[in-house]
């Protein structure tokens, strides 16, 4: 698993991308789809049309890192909002990578009387 500095944001591109893309192709997708700087130090997640393949692009300060995972029997849980971009917490990203349904996780309130759910992230 990659180490992330505090303040690192995790972006999820909801529309599928061509999984043949490598560093440069995904960096261009970050700019075109997510409208962000691929060299910002943030984490960018993409998946293919079939839904069983995930690629993550991250600038670690010295170069671009490309993480890839293919699920053998399932599909990654992905929103159906084509064209949208979502922000995930690092914990949600960890669940996504494991193939879990990260959308069903609810955070416990940090103080009494405050209701914080994953819908508010």
Image (cartoon, helix red, strand yellow):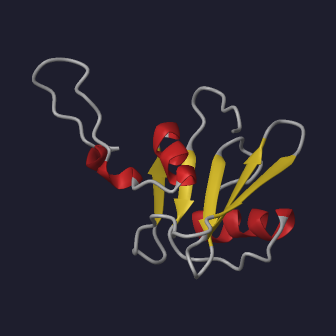
Q: What's the residue at 71%, 38% (across, down)?
A: 2
Farthest residue, direction front: 73
Q: Position of residue 73 (x, y in %)?
A: 55, 70
Image vertical order of residue 80 relative to residue 77, above or below: below
Q: Is residue 104 visible?
A: yes
Relative to 65, 121 lies left or right: left
> Which of the two residues, 28 or 15, is positioned nearer the viewer here?
15
Q: Is residue 35 visible?
A: no
Q: What's the residue at 85%, 66% (across, down)?
A: 24
Viewport quadrant of the C terminus: top left
Viewport quadrant of the N terminus: top right
Q: How many marks?
A: 0
Q: What's the residue at 40%, 75% (across, down)?
A: 80
Q: Position of residue 110 (x, y in %)?
A: 26, 20
Image vertical order of residue 115 relative to residue 80, above or below: above
> Which of the two residues, 76 or 114, is positioned nearer the viewer here?
76
Relative to 19, 33 lies left or right: left
Q: Position of residue 27 (x, y in %)?
A: 77, 62
Q: Quadrant of residue 78?
A: bottom left
Farthest residue, direction right: 62
Farthest residue, direction left: 113
Relative to 107, 11 lies left or right: right
> Which of the two residues, 120 or 107, is positioned nearer the viewer here?
107
Q: Quadrant of residue 55?
A: bottom right
Relative to 9, 101 lies left or right: left
Q: Position of residue 87 (x, y in %)?
A: 47, 51
């Amino acid at each position: 698993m990659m180490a992330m500095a505090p303040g690192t944001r995790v972006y999820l591109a909801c529309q599928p991308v061509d999984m043949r893309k490598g560093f440069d192709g995904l960096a261009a997708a970050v700019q075109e789809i997510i409208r962000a700087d691929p060299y910002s130090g943030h984490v960018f997640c993409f998946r293919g049309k079939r839904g069983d393949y995930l690629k993550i692009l991250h600038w670690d300060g010295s170069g671009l890192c490309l993480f890839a995972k293919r699920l053998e029997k399932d599909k990654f849980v992905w929103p159906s909002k084509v064209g949208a971009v979502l922000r995930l917490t690092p914990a949600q990203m960890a669940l996504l990578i494991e193939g879990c349904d990260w959308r069903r996780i609810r955070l416990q309130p940090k103080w009494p009387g405050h209701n914080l759910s994953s819908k508010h992230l």
